[in-house]
Image (tube, rainbow, N blue to C red):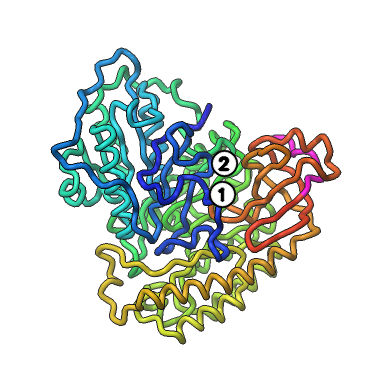
Amino acid sequence: MPPVPLLPCPSRLWSCGRPRVKPVGQSRSGEAGLAEPVWRSRSGEAGLAKPFAFCSRAWRNSAPCAPPHPSRSSLHLPKAATKTHAPKVGFVSLGCPKALVDSERILSQLRAEGYETAADYAGADVVVVNTCGFLDSARAESLDAIGEALAENGRVIVTGCLGAEANVIRDAHPNVLAVTGPHQYEAVVTAVHEAVPPPHDPFVDLVPAQGVKLTPRHYAYLKISEGCNHRCSFCIIPRLRGDLVSRPAADVLAEAERLVRAGVRELLVISQDTSAYGVDVRYATSQWRGRAVAARITDLAAALGELGAWIRLHYVYPYPHVDELIPLMADGKVLSYLDVPFQHASPKILKAMKRPASEAKTLERIRAWREAVPDLTIRSTFIVGFPGETEQDFQTLLDWLDEAELDRVGCFRYEPVHNAPANTLPNAVPEDVKEERWHRFMAAQQTISARRLARRVGTEIDVIVDELDGDQAVGRSMADAPEIDGRVYLSLARGPAGAGAKKLRAGSIVTARVTNADEYDLWAEPVAEPAARR
């Protein structure tokens, strides 16, 4: 099934695809002001003719450059669809992978009811905009997206994080048809029904077994919980999405099985706090494959490891019990990859952030993890310029970074978040100082990353292919998550695998020998034919 076409970005500052020019630091996500990485689709640029152009740059720390909103009197509101063809819904999805999963769920329900997805505004009977509301820049971009949808189509339903503040949306755009908050799936579907009645009752056979997916078919995001119990001072996720609500382990595993049967070869486990999974239900068990599986991240990860796919863990808060995941990585049950948002290293700043505040203990744990799993890849994110950050605090961070030698790093300039407690903290850092520290941080990490990647030259790695381009394939190693980490460029014209390399396709997993490296990416030649589907 081809990817679902989504509407293009409202902003032309960035295409929806992966940026062609790399930032100066290690992370391609290092241009935002928050604790989470930027996720972008690389399957289409921001053109109406291109499929799968979903918008996910709402974490950018820059002013959006959408066209100005039309005056309210100039908005053209077309009549509800009266055509005999299936009603079509346009969809704009902003923000992080967790919001993307919400969009997939809504689209799956609409597909079951006979709705089709429009490739452009003109072909849509109604447009749904799934917003991001975390940063002020994200809020502005979401409002711009709503404004463009109104200007281009006129019949707009708003959902997502910014939807939790309906008054903000209606003050800016009183002509929207409906506003719902985050993870209010049924409310969105009901609003679509009211705008464009469904052609029939739901038919399950209209939806692929894996549901409607907005990622390439060989990988998928697997959301295991919603909400967060933490109260980090820079964050408003609990206010927007509530406290932690974990899915039963059997439900997560059943979804994962469907995805793998449908051809997914990599599952990216996501949530607001992956390592807290099951705390809210006291690690309750549920039945899967005739046995009880606890809603605990270690138990869930072990069960997922039985499915024969790459299992990648994201948003892992550094609890002590995260250490229990390391043996699963050593045994090959899950990928040797940890995405842990450390945020800073200065105890004073971590305390102000309301984050764990022992940089020495963190370094000890990193050393222990790597001793158990020598090829472990650690990704993290940091904030520079947080209120009260002195030059000494920043130097503490640089020293910690040099000792930790992390593999993948995103660094964000602090940006105030609407209604976040950190907004009231004293001693705000000037913008020029934030900028200078960001560049110093990224330059330091660039050196570390180049050194670590250079060690891979001459080694053999497994690569999952994302796309083919002539006599070259572009993929990722086990150390690289889609969109935010590095790439592996495979030469198909060279290498001892010979004709076997010609059999590569998106989703193939092939063994390759690394021939070159830079600060971000690897170049390699296949040495074995693609692995058979397990």
Of the 4 image quadrants, the one containing the C terminus is top right
Image location of residue 498, percent across then percent down: 84, 38
Q: Is residue 470 left or right of residue 486?
A: right
Q: Is residue 314 left or right of residue 406?
A: left
Q: Amino acid at mark 1?
A: Pro
Choose the circle earlier in sequence order: 2 or 1: 2
Q: Is disc 2 in contact with disc 1, using a CB cutoff of under 8 Å? A: yes
SS of the residue at dot 2? strand
Image location of residue 443, percent across then percent down: 57, 72
From the image, tell me which residue sits under label 2: 219
Image location of residue 349, percent across then percent down: 40, 79
Vertically, is 378 above or below 311?
below
Q: How many marks?
A: 2
Q: Identify the mark at residue 482; answer none if there is no mark.
A: 1
Q: Is residue 237 visible?
A: no
Instruction: Spot the residue most to the left.
Output: 73
Q: Amino acid at mark 2?
A: Tyr
Image location of residue 303, percent across then percent down: 58, 46
Segment tinted magenta in the rendering: 525-534
Q: Which quadrant of the view contains residue 62?
A: bottom left
Q: Is residue 334 left or right of residue 71?
A: right
